[in-house]
Image (cartoon, helix red, strand yellow):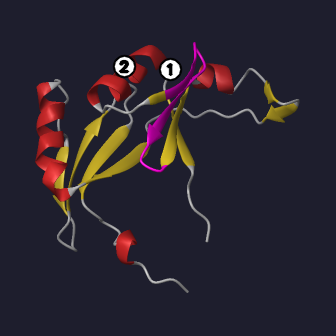
Amino acid sequence: MITIVETCIYAENLDETIRFYKEVLDLPLIAFEEDRHAFFKCGKGMLLIFDPNHTSRVQTEVSGSPVPLHGAKGENHIAFSVKESEYENWKQNLIDNGVAIESVVKWPNGVDSFYFRDPAGNSLEIIRGDLWNLGNEKKT
């Protein structure tokens, strides 16, 4: 089985976006390099935020090996799952921090979620519980 260990988004306004993930979403900042990246712990994985103006043009090496250039323009999407009992608190926290809720969805399986944007314009979603039923998947 393969699992996602990290995912990344891009933000040209890195400082403002870092503040949002630290202060509004309360994710722990693990690593930071000015004008290049911020790495946040998120559950069992990592959320990496890169400035594409740097990572798409400046070659980086780690232990003598090049990290491939990468970058994207435009909005990306990330969905976060929260405990059912925390869902309404997260929605209110965002509203209290001046974040507009774009849409509220009830999925066909009865799970609720809502969408909002980060300062870089990325589409974020908070899901009440387990939308994909990942906690009950069968092992083959």
From the image, state whether disc 2 or disc 1 is nearer to you.
2
Return the x and y of residue 117 as percentages of the image width and height: 30, 34
Return the x and y of residue 88 as percentages of the image width and height: 11, 47
Q: Is residue 19 magenta?
A: no
Q: Say whether residue 119 is visible.
A: no
Image: magenta residue range: 30-44
Closer to the camera in the image, 10 or 6: 6
The image quarter in which residue 123 lies: top left
State left or right for residue 33 relative to residue 114: right
The residue shown at (79%, 30%) is: 62
Classify mark 2: residues with Cα within 10 Å, few (<14), some (14-19) or many (20+).
some
Closer to the camera in the image, 51 or 65: 65
Say which residue label 1 marks. 12
Q: State whether residue 22 is above or below residue 90.
A: above
Q: State whether residue 39 is above or below residue 86.
A: above
Task: Give the number of the disc on residue 19.
Answer: 2
Q: State whether residue 104 is above or below residue 76.
A: below
Return the x and y of residue 128 as percentages of the image width and height: 21, 57
User: Are discs 2 and 1 less than 8 Å apart at CB?
Assistant: no
The residue shown at (74%, 20%) is: 58
Q: Earlier in the sequence, mark 2 or mark 1?
A: 1
The residue shown at (37%, 30%) is: 121
Kind of residue sitting beneath label 2: Arg
The image quarter in which residue 127 lies: bottom left
Mark 2 element type: helix
Mark 1 element type: loop
State left or right for residue 58 relative to residue 65: left
